[in-house]
Amino acid sequence: MTTFILPIGLLVVTLVGTLLVRSRSEAIRATFDLALFVLLGCVLFREDTSPILTGANVPMGPEGHWLRAVGIVWWYAAARLATAGIGRLLGHDERSREARITSDLLSAAVYIATILIVLNFVLLLPVNGLLATSGIIAVVIGLALQNTLADVFSGIAVGIEHPFSVGDRVTLGEGVEGLVVQVNWRSIRIQTDGEDVATIPNSVVAKAQILNRSFPTERRSARVMLNCPAWIPPERIIVLLKHASLLCPNILASPPAVVTVVRLGVRTNAYAIDFFVCTTREIATTKSFLLQHAHRQLRHAGLLDEVSPTNALLDAVPPALRLVREIELFASLTAEQQTELAARMEHRRLKTDEVLFREGDEDQTLYMVGSGIVEITRHGQGGVTSIGRIGAGEYIGEIGLLTGAPHAATATAFTPSAVYSLPPTALLPILAADPELAVAFEQSVHRGLTLLDRKVAAEASAYPQGPGALLHNIRRFFASSGPSGRRNSTGKD
C-alpha cells in the first residue's frame, strides 16, 4: 500500500492545484505545469519507467494502474506547457490575443496528438481501427462543412501573413471599410464609420484586396474634382484652388495639396485637388470645407458670374461692392447704403509676409479680403501662435470698427493679397440717418461670430463680454466720434 501513496498524493495535488490556478495569471499557471511536469517525471524515473508505459517494467495490477494515471497526468502537463509556449511565440500582446486562429489550431493539434499517444502508449489501447474510422468520418464531415473549413484555413493563411491587426482600419475590395474589432476562426468583424459591424468570412478576406489604412501611418489622401468655365485661364484657377486648400486647417501642409488640370473641354475644364489629412474621419468634413472655400474664392474673383467671356469686365460686379453685399455685418443696409460704403472703401495690395495690423494696435478699421490669404497670429508664452487663416470674402476687425477696441492678434499676408479697408467715419453718416442701425449691427456681429468660418477672424479682436455690452459700446463709440473722429463737445454716450 505504501507504494501507492506517492502517486496517489501527486494525483490529488494535481487535481487541487489545477482548480486553484485556473483563474490565476499565465505565469502562475505555467510555473505550476512545469513543477508538475518535473515531479511526475521524477516519479516515473523512480519507478524505473518512462512516460511511454510499455514493456515489463510496468507491473500489472493496481500499482501499474496508478503509474499509468501518473503517465496520463504527465502527458497532460506536457501538452499544457506546449500550448503555452505556442501562444507565447505567436504573440502575447493585447491585440494578438484577439486573433488566435493559428495558435488555437496548433494547440488543438497538440491535445489531439497527446490523446492518441496516451491511448496507444500509456493505456495500450489499439488506435489503428479508430484512426481508420475517424478518417472516414472526417471525409464526411469535411464534405458537409467545406465552406466552414475553407473559412478556417483561409483564416490560418491570413493569420500567417498578418496583413492587419485588431484596431487597424482596413478596406476590403471596394465594399467595406472600417476598424477591425475581432478576428476569430471563421470571420473578421469590422466596425464601419456608420457604427455598424460587418462580419466578413475569412475565405472572402483571403481573396479580397486588403488595404491597411493604419500602416505605416493613418494619414489618408483624398481628391476633390471641380469643373470651371473653359474661358478662364487655367493658371488663374489653379492659384485660386490652391488658396482654397490653404484655408482648410485639416489639410496637411506636408505633403502640400496639389491642383492639376485633368481635362480640357469646349465649355468647361476639369480640375483636381489632391490633399492629405491625418485620419479617415476627417476626409468628409475636409472635402466639404474645401468645396466651400473653392466656391468663395471663385465667386469673389468674379469667375462664377453669369457673364460672357467677351463682356466679363463690363458685366462683373466691382469687388468692393461684392464684398459689402455678401458680408453678414452689412446685411441690414439698403442697396444704396451698401453702394455708398463700397465707394468709401480703400484698396490695398499686400506682399507675402507684409503686416496688415499688429496685436495691440488701436486701429478702428474693418478689413475685407478681396483675394489672397491673410494669416492671424498671436503672441503667447510659447512664442507666436497661428490662430488660422482667412481668405477672399472674409473680413476682420469688426469689433474694433464698431467699438474702438484694440486688435487682439496680428494679421499678416500669407500670400500676395488684395485687401479693402473701411474706416469708422464711413459709417457715421449712415448711423446718423438711422440710429437704430446700431441694433442691426449688433445682431449682425452676433450672427457672424456664430459661423464656423468666422471663428478665426473673431479671435483677432477683443470681444466685449456681458449682455448688451456690444450694443452699448457701439453706441458710445459712434456717439463720441464726430466726422473727424474726436469726441463730441457734450461728452455724452
Image: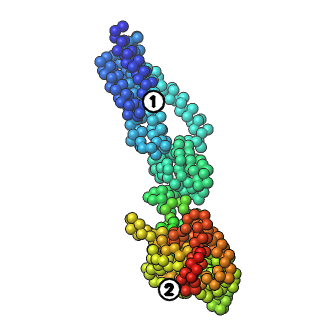
- Determine if residue 93 is in view: yes
The residue shown at (45%, 40%) is 103
Label for residue 177?
Answer: none
- Element at badge 2? strand
Q: Position of residue 234 (x, y in %)?
A: 56, 83
Above-or-below relation of 264 to 461: below
- Determine if residue 309 is in view: no
Question: Reading the chain from its start, which is encountered first: label 1 or label 2?
Answer: 1
Q: CA distance from mark 1 to mark 2?
A: 75 Å
Residue sitting nearer the eye, 386 or 122: 386
Q: Quadrant of the C terminus?
A: bottom right
Q: Nearer the viewer, mark 1 or mark 2?
A: 2
How many discs mark residues in the rendered view? 2
Q: Position of residue 105 (x, y in %)?
A: 48, 38
Label for residue 23?
Answer: 1
Q: Which amino acid is tagged 2?
A: Arg
Q: Which amino acid is tagged 1?
A: Ser
The residue shown at (34%, 26%) is 35
The residue shown at (49%, 74%) is 406
Neighbour class for label 1 at 10 Å: few (<14), some, many (≥20)? few
Neighbour class for label 2 at 10 Å: few (<14), some, many (≥20)? some
- Element at badge 1? loop
Q: Based on the displayed image, in which of its 4 quarters is residue 272 positioned?
A: bottom right
Q: Position of residue 295 (x, y in %)?
A: 61, 75
Q: Based on the displayed image, in which of its 4 quarters is residue 231 positioned?
A: bottom right
Does residue 291 appear left or right of residue 65 in this picture? Answer: right
Q: Quadrant of the N terminus?
A: top left
Q: Position of residue 426 (x, y in %)?
A: 59, 84
Residue sitting nearer the eye, 199 or 324: 324
The residue shown at (35%, 18%) is 55
Q: Which residue is mark 2?
A: 349
